[in-house]
Image (spheres, helix red, strand yellow):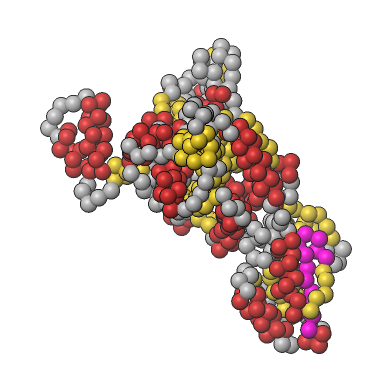
Amino acid sequence: MSDSELISKIVSLCKQRGFIFQSSDIYGGLKSAYDYGPLGVELKRNLAAEWWRDMVHRREDIVGIDASIFMHPAVWKASGHLAEFSDPLVDCLNCKERFRADKAPQVEPGTAVEYIKGGKNKGETLKGSVPEAGYVCPNCGSPELSSERQFNLMFRTSIGPVDPLDAAIDEIADKSLSRKEIRERIEEALRPSAIYLRPETAQAIFVQYLNVLQSTSMKVPFGIAQQGKSFRNEIITEKFIFRTCEFEQMEMEFFIEPGTQDEWLDYWTKERMNWWQKFANSDDAFRARQHEEDELAHYATNCYDIEYKYPWGWDELEGVASRTDYDLKKHMGESGTKLTYFDQQKPDPETGKNGWRYTPYVIEPAAGLTRGVLVYLCDAYREEKGTDADGKEKTRKLLKLHPRLAPYKAAILPLVKKDGLPDIARNIVNDFLKEGINTKYDEQQSIGKRYARHDEVGTPYCITIDHDTASDNAVTIRDRDTTQQERIPIAEAIATVKKRLEGTVA
Ligand code: ATP
């Protein structure tokens, strides 16, 4: 199976089996916006819950928050997002493709290149030379490009009952102004009510640092975690749910003593690598890659990307960044609120006297939840060749999801739709549901087809009720990955599934 085949198979399985749908599908879809269906929402919530469990519930040194998406516009001024959160945008003058300069194919300036006029498949071949910027159009390979301009990725809207356009119209009506002046006037008119959809969850953590510190007894080193939606007006949305304008993040800001950042960066990079690998089939599809100097975000002095080997190659899944005291200092400056930490026990390095007041440094592991869903779908998708009961060749489609991430934990299947088997099965389903174990009753089609259906959506255990069940009070439990079946008493079914689910993670 080729790499592009794999991604298109995953996309079509996701639609057919209710994991992920194109947004507004019946209207032709909204480009690169996706809705999570009944199975996809379970997978996404399971992944988020595992992160929360490991980052917050299983640690004494991290607490969580859930902040609003709208924040005071001053937050984005202080954080640098208004001035710096932009991508270099370039237009191809040959095929009209609009692309990010930093993601374009890099070619030595001056290299002679050939490309087809208009970016078509065939036609007149043109010759050119790679410009000083050192890249060509990713679509047609042309070196004929516009200059770069910075494009801010934040979505801007307005808050309040006044339509800011009225103020903008008043500013420019009946005046003869240049384009530049019109833009400036409109910007000015929009500014008082402008508000932004957050492009990351992190800033809310920095601006609530003091409230969290004062309302809990947290001591440095400690972390504040948050999961939630973020929005970026991406120049190019791509590769299914890999890069979308609306997505979900799982971020944690870990506040530390200045001077300890290297050891904590190392600690969190390893922790996060191990965490992703814990739920994956292939450990070697993950790697930590240190950022080059010119890749670092404006707030970072060091950063490791945890990358996954997607069907198109290595790409980012999570960034673990050393953010120094940049954010707290910026918010202190902008808000005038003291965001420092006082350690009574520690001697001040400058005076040597006990009691040290400092601005904490920060290590940030910032992961994409929706990107994580894509990673585990890629990791889990399998097509296994085998033979059926009649010896015919068949392909078993399998989503080898980690049992704790799987949408359904168990499928309860009466062998036939009669002889009282459905009643016994329904009782078992009810018992599972009462325990909060997401379980699916399924009596449609042959048992083989039902196994296949559940293999395809990643259900780890199928429990079958057959004609012996009424007399021996036992059922068979089939393991998705090995297809091995085992007979167990009905009374032990829940405990068996629970034990297997627990046993799958450290
Ligand atoms: P990229 O280099 O892929 O644009 P980034 O370095 O800008 O990502 P961060 O700002 O570090 O990303 O955000 C942390 C995580 O949030 C990323 O590792 C990724 O998993 C996720 N993420 C960022 N942008 C998007 C997006 N547009 N769609 C989906 N997930 C995203």
Compare residues 352 and 279 and report the one nearer the observer. 352
- Would residue 11 be counted in the magenta stretch? no
Residue at left offset 43%, top offset 53%: 215
Relative to 472, is 161 above or below? above
Above or below: residue 43 compared with residue 357: below
Residue 218 placement (x, y as % from top left): 51, 49
Q: In the rendered view, would you say 461 is above or below 309? A: below
Which residue shows up at 71% across the image and 63% down it?
Answer: 501
User: In x, y percent, where is residue 242?
Assistant: 56, 44
- In the foreground, 283 or 130: 283
- Using residue 461 as the reference point, say whether residue 177 is left or right of it: left
- Residue 280: x %, y % from top left: 70, 50
Which quarter of the figure has residue 206? top left
Q: Which residues are magenta?
A: 473-484
- In the rendered structure, does residue 482 fall within the stretch colored magenta? yes
Residue at (48, 27) in percent of width and height: 351
Please state if 192 lies on the left or on the right of 483 as rendered.
Answer: left
Which of these two is toward me, 200 or 311? Answer: 200
Which residue is outermost to the top? Answer: 110
On the picture, is 434 further left or further right than 281?
left
